[in-house]
Amino acid sequence: MNEPLLVTGSYVVQKAHELENSPLDMAIAGMEGAATRFSIDAISDAKTRTSYMNNIKRMSIQTKEDVAAGKLTAREGAEFCQEMRNRILQEHRKFTSAQGVAF
């Protein structure tokens, strides 16, 4: 059973609303933003950083293509991107936390 996708905001109750931004697009932007910050803080080699960001962009494009082709629902695509963002942030903490910097 598909549960509805929760989008927070100020909305009048008992009325249908158009979303200003696609939840999938917002999830992709969150993943790409986290990846950009990670690449700046954790990857010193410019060539490696560029390759990493190209791979993130390729993953974003592939997710959109999979949703458009019906291989994934928009919800599944958004959840995938949110999970990847969380993993990137977890790795980022290793480089920015006091313990990670000390290591």
Image (tube, rainbow, N blue to C red):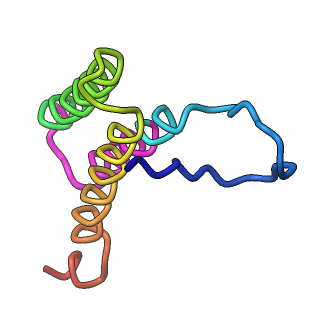
* Above or below, 82 relative to 25: below
Determine whether 66 is above or below 97 in the image. Answer: above
Q: Position of residue 38 (x, y in %)?
A: 30, 52
Image x and y of residue 18, in percent: 73, 30
Of residues 91 and 7, the one nearer the viewer is 7
Percent coordinates x, y for residue 1 in the rendering: 37, 50
- Compared across the picture, whether 21 is left or right of 4 comes to right
At x 18% / y 47%, what residue is drawn? 44
Residue 8 is covered by the magenta coloring? no
Which quadrant of the structure image shows residue 102?
bottom left
Q: Residue furthest front?
A: 1
Quadrant showing the C terminus: bottom left
Identify the residue shown where x is 20% and y is 37%: 49
Q: Residue at x 28, y 27 (%)?
A: 57
Is the magenta region chiefly helix, strand or loop?
Answer: helix
Q: From what the image shows, is residue 58 above or below residue 86? A: above
Apparent side of residue 8 relative to residue 94 in the rendered image (left or right)? right
Give above or below for 39 relative to 86: above
Q: How many labels does the image show?
A: 0
Q: Residue at x 28, y 28 (%)?
A: 63
Residue 16 image offset from top left, x and y in percent: 77, 37
Observer-nearest residue: 83 or 1?
1
Tell me the magenta residue range.
29-46
